[in-house]
Image (cartoon, rainbow, N blue to C red):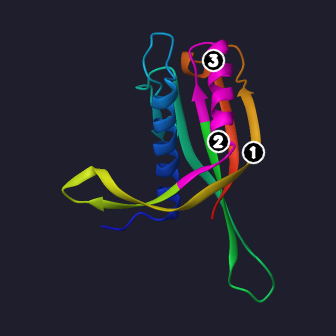
Amino acid sequence: MLTWQTTKNLINSLKYYLDTEISSDSVTDNAGDVIPVRIGRKDDDNWTLPCIAIYKDDETNEKIFIGSNQTDDRRLIVIDLFAEDEGQREDVADWLVTKLTDGWRYYTYTVNINTPLNPSKIAAGWVSIDFLTNTRVNLGQNVSLFDQNRHRITVDSWIS
C-alpha cells in the first residue's frame, strides 16, 4: 500500500483540526447536530445540510532561487460550505475564517492495516495560509437545495 503523501496528509490534518474545533466550539446546525466535515468534492446527493467539504485544487512548486532545487511548495485548498439558510452560511463562514487564520498543525499519517479508518498520526509541522477568496457562491435562482446557500473559501497553504 502506498504511504500517504503530502497532499493527503495536509487535507486530513485540516479535517482533524476542523472536527476538533467544531466539537470544542459546539458548532451545530439548526437541529443541534454537529456540522460534518467531508474530504472531497460533492459528487452525489447523499450529503446532509449543512456540511463542509475540503479538497486540494492546485499546487505550485516554484524554485526559491536560480540554481537551487529547493522549492516553495504551496497548495490551494478549497473549503465549500453548504448551509441550510443564509444566516447559517454567514455564521459558519465567519467561524471558519476565524479558525483558519492562524493555520493548523500538520500531521503525517501512517495507515495501520488492522485499523484502516484510524491511521496513526505524528505532528510534523504547521500549516500557514493566505486567504484568497471568501465569498458566497451565487449559482442563480433555479438551483438545488444543496447549492442555494453555498459559500467558498480558498486558501493558499504551505507547510513549515
User: Circle 2 sits on which residue?
Assistant: 100
Lateral position of residue 109 relative to residue 127, left or right: left
Q: For the C terminus, give its image quadrant.
A: bottom right
Q: Is residue 159 visible?
A: yes
Q: Residue at x 52, y 38 (%)?
A: 18
Q: Residues within 10 Å of mark 1 (few under 14, many from 20)?
A: some
The CA span between labels 3 and 2 is 24 Å
Q: Residues within 10 Å of mark 2 (few under 14, many from 20)?
A: some
Q: Is residue 40 visible?
A: no
User: Circle 1 sits on which residue?
Assistant: 131
The CA span between labels 1 and 2 is 9 Å
The residue closer to the viewer here, 36 or 48, is 36
Give the extent of the magenta segment. 80-105
Q: Residues within 10 Å of mark 3 (few under 14, many from 20)?
A: many
Considering every residue shown, the one lying at the far right of the view is 66
Q: Residue at x 44, y 21 (%)?
A: 48
Q: Residue at x 44, y 23 (%)?
A: 34
Residue 148 — which label? 3
Q: Position of residue 144 (x, y in %)?
A: 57, 18
Q: For the N terminus, give its image quadrant.
A: bottom left
Q: Tell me the mark number nearer the camera, choosing from 1 and 2.
A: 2
How many discs appear?
3
Name the kind of residue labelled 1 in the image: Phe
The residue closer to the viewer here, 103 or 88, is 103
Q: Height in image: 107 above or below 135? A: below
Considering every residue shown, the one lying at the far front of the view is 24
Q: Tell me the mark number nearer the camera, choosing from 3 and 2.
A: 2
Q: Height in image: 154 above or below 111? A: above
Mark 2, secondary structure of its residue: helix
Asked whether the residues under the numbered discs 1 and 2 touch, taking CB atoms below 8 Å apart as contact, a structural biologist would say: yes
